Structure formats: structure tokens, C-alpha cells
Image: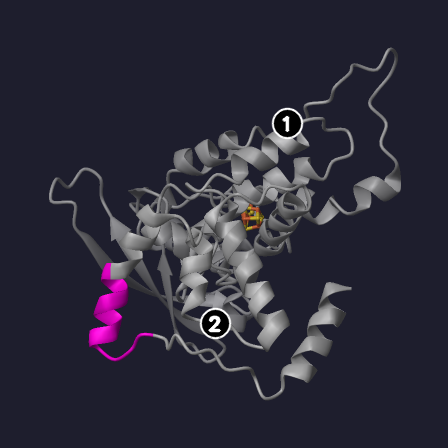
Amino acid sequence: MEASRKGILMKVNLKVKRFDPDDSSGKTWWQEYNIDTHQDSTVLDALIHVREYEDTSLALRCACRASICGSCGMKVNGSAKLVCKTRVVEIAPNGESIVIEPMGNHPVIKDLVVSLDTFFNQIKRVNPYLQPDHVPQTGEYIASNESMENLLTAMNCIMCGCCVSDCTVLEVDDNFIGPAALAKAWRFVDDPRDSKRIERLKDLNDEDGGFWDCTRCMQCVEVCPKGVDPMGRIMELRDIALNNGLTNTYGAKHASAVSNHIEHSGRIDEFRLPLESKGIFNIKEIIKLMLPGLRFALRKRAPSPLHFKNPNQKFVKTLFKKVEK
Ligand code: SF4
Ligand code: FES
């Protein structure tokens, strides 16, 4: 993509985060590249241009250049994207700077290249393969088209790691299984040929890192380039677990307390919610809640023990019933 090439329409400024593993100080720095680019260029085209003609030391990873292989995930202007699917003109139509960093929540190997070891270890945690209860005597395992249609979007996952990159829970808790692995788990939980549905749900229902740790921030939904909707899949896992009687976790108790409060008074009872989530008779956990509770009380920010009904309670009840249906 030489500057003299016919059809050049715009200049672009790329601000790239650099990291050199051979530099023992471990420092990172920003480097700017000003290049000419064609209107149809993707951010990946622009980066490849930099590597070919401006700075051969720049490290980046890509393969298919067609949003299929999942290897070019990076942060562009603060959110994870496949750079082969992101056109320069769409994010910098007037030649604005484009800020490019390696994906978040993945260890950086060099410049824009991250290690996916943790990502694939998370995927392995959910046993991402079918576990049927019998081997067909002849031929393949057959599932009807209708029973598989539901799984198609989840099966579109290309393991790019974008959802993991922008997951706000993983930023503070690296034990969380993460959106991609949970979406993968849902795909097998909902597969009619799998025989380990309940075992899978029990594992993921675990307090520590399981599906109740998702805070529904929606970041994974926004950045997924394949419409997998990992958060939606996580919410479905929760529903399936509850419908299968797996209710003995703080997450499940919390969800059922929220639902009861809304149904009965049209609003959440902030005072009772933490108590009911932990279990009213769970003395050990209730004692643990007392210290932060006291701190809130001293700052006059503790919720009132008096709970008042929502004046629009009837309307909320009607909505609640509709949602339940
Ligand atoms: Fe990428 Fe979407 Fe799969 Fe996450 S769920 S790894 S964002 S394709
Ligand atoms: Fe394959 Fe971008 S290079 S998905």
C-alpha cells in the first residue's frame, strides 16, 4: 500500500502501545505512526503497512484477514475488536488518531501480541466436548435440526478472546471462568446429545468463578464480533440451573430474593437483600456483613430497615407477571 498507490483518500495517525520482552525494565510506551491509507483499509491493513514499510520491529498477530481465525483481537480506542473487521474510515473518518493496544485480561507477549494460554485454560475448565451416554451402533449421533438451531450463534464463536479482554469481572478476579468459556459451556448444556448437563451445571454453579460471578456489565455482548452474546448465555445457564433445583448458592439466593422483593413490593428491599442472599440463619456470613454495614451506617449511607412499597406497585406486578410468562 505505497503512498503513491492510486485511490489514497486519507491520512491516519496510529498510536500504538509497545512492549519489548527483552527490555528488563518491563516498561511500555506509546509510538505514533502517520501513514497514508486507502478508504477501504482495515486497521489491520494499516498495521501491516507500518510493519512492512515503517517499523519492522512492531509485533502483531493475524492470519485469515477475514474475521474467521480469531487471531487479530486488539483494543482499538479502548474496546476489543478484530482489527481485520474494523475499517479505518469508520472509526477515524476525519483522520483522527486511532489508539491501538493489546487485548486486556491476557498477558502481553510483545507489542500487540498476547498469550491465549489463560483463555484456553478457561475453555478447558468447562470440558468443551460432547459427553453422550451411548455410542450409536452405526453412523453418527443424530440430532434434529430444530434442536440444534438454538445453538448456532454460540457455535459461531471463533475464540478471539475479545469478550475476555473487556470483561470487567476478570479485571478484578482472574478466577472467574469468563464469558467465552461460559458461552461454550452453555452450548454443551443445551446440546440434546450431551448426557452431563446436570454435572456441568453443578460445576458452573460453584461460588468460586462460576456463572453467578458475572455482573451483567454487557461488555462481552458489545465487543463480540460474532454475535455470540456471552452474557445472554450466562443468564440462560443461571435459569437452567434454577429450573433444575440448583438453588443452594449465594447467587441463586440473591436472584430469588430480588425477584421476590419486586413481585411483592415493586422494589428491592436493600436492607434485607444482603441478609437473604447469604441466608438469614447463616450467622458466620451475617457477622461478616456487619462491619461494612456499620461503616455505611456511620456515613449515613446504610439502607433503612423500613421498607416501603413502590407507589406503582400494581403496574410493576403486571410487568413482573408478563416477564414471568
Ligand atoms: Fe470472541 Fe465472541 Fe467467542 Fe468471545 S464469544 S471469544 S468475543 S467470538
Ligand atoms: Fe483472522 Fe482477523 S486475521 S480474524
x and y percent of residue 323 in the render? 72, 68
Closer to the N terminus: mark 1 or mark 2? Answer: 1
Please name the residue that numbered disc 1 is placed on: 129
**Inter-mark Cα distance, 1 to 2:** 42 Å
Q: In terms of depth relative to the viewer, which is nearer, 90 or 297?
A: 297
x and y percent of residue 42 in the render? 52, 60
Q: In terms of depth relative to the viewer, which is nearer, 263 or 22?
A: 263
Q: Is residue 323 above or below residue 114?
A: below
- Residue at image point 73% right, 77% down: 318
Q: Is residue 5 above or below residue 195?
A: below
- Residue at image point 26% right, 71% down: 296
Residue 178 is one of the magenta-drawn residues:
no
Q: Is residue 3 in sight in this rendering?
A: no
Q: Which residues are magenta?
A: 291-302
The local crowd at label 1, few if under 14, some if 14 to 19, many if 20 or more residues have their Cα within 10 Å, is few
- Residue at image point 60% right, 49% down: 238
Residue 113 lies in what quarter of the image?
A: top left
Label 2 sits on a secondary structure element that is loop
Please name the residue that numbered disc 2 is placed on: 269
Q: Residue furthest bottom?
A: 311
The kind of secondary structure the magenta stretch mainly shows is helix
- Residue at image point 63% right, 27% down: 129
x and y percent of residue 307 in the render? 47, 78
Residue 61 lies in what quarter of the image?
A: top left
